[in-house]
Image: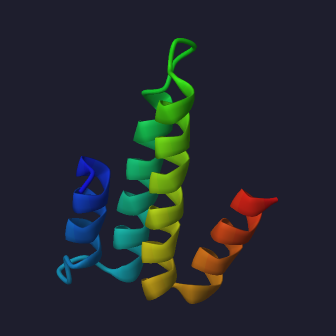
Amino acid sequence: MDKIRLLADKIIEDFTLTVKDRTDELLKLDAIQYTNLGLESSKEEREGVKDNSKYIYRKIKEIDEPLGKNLIHHMDV
């Protein structure tokens, strides 16, 4: 399993954090992976980041369904 997905799973299961804090941490994780892409990134790397984003948004949907649905919907547009 991808390191990003493992971190997302860890964050989602950290019940010491509020829903908002877990959501914020997941969105930070998503932003970090996009900032690590560069002009030289391959198509496979870009697709991997997009797949990870969708995974993160599904995790957000587990704790904040309206936000998760909205993120997934806008990703597919």
- Residue sitting nearer the eye, 20 or 75: 75
At 41% across and 39% down in the image, what residue appears?
Answer: 32
Q: Position of residue 9 (x, y in %)?
A: 26, 69
Nearer to the camera, 72 or 66: 72
Viewer-side residue, 14 vs 47: 47
Question: Is residue 41 placed above or below 54 in the rendered structure?
Answer: above
Q: Judge left or right: residue 12 versus residue 69.
A: left
Q: How many marks?
A: 0
- Say above or below: 8 vs 14: above
Q: How is the image coloured?
A: rainbow
Quadrant for residue 23, please give it: bottom left
65 lies above or below 58: below
Location of the C terminus (image quadrant): bottom right
Left or right: 57 in relation to 24:
right
Q: Position of residue 64 (x, y in %)?
A: 51, 84
* Up/down of 61 relative to 21, above or below: below
Query: What residue is shown at x 73% (from left), y 70% (from top)?
Result: 73
Farthest residue in the right direction?
77
**Residue in view at x 58 percent, y 76 percent:** 68
- In the rendered image, which quarter is residue 18 located in? bottom left
Task: Judge from the rendering whether residue 76 lies leftward or rightward of residue 35; answer left or right.
Answer: right
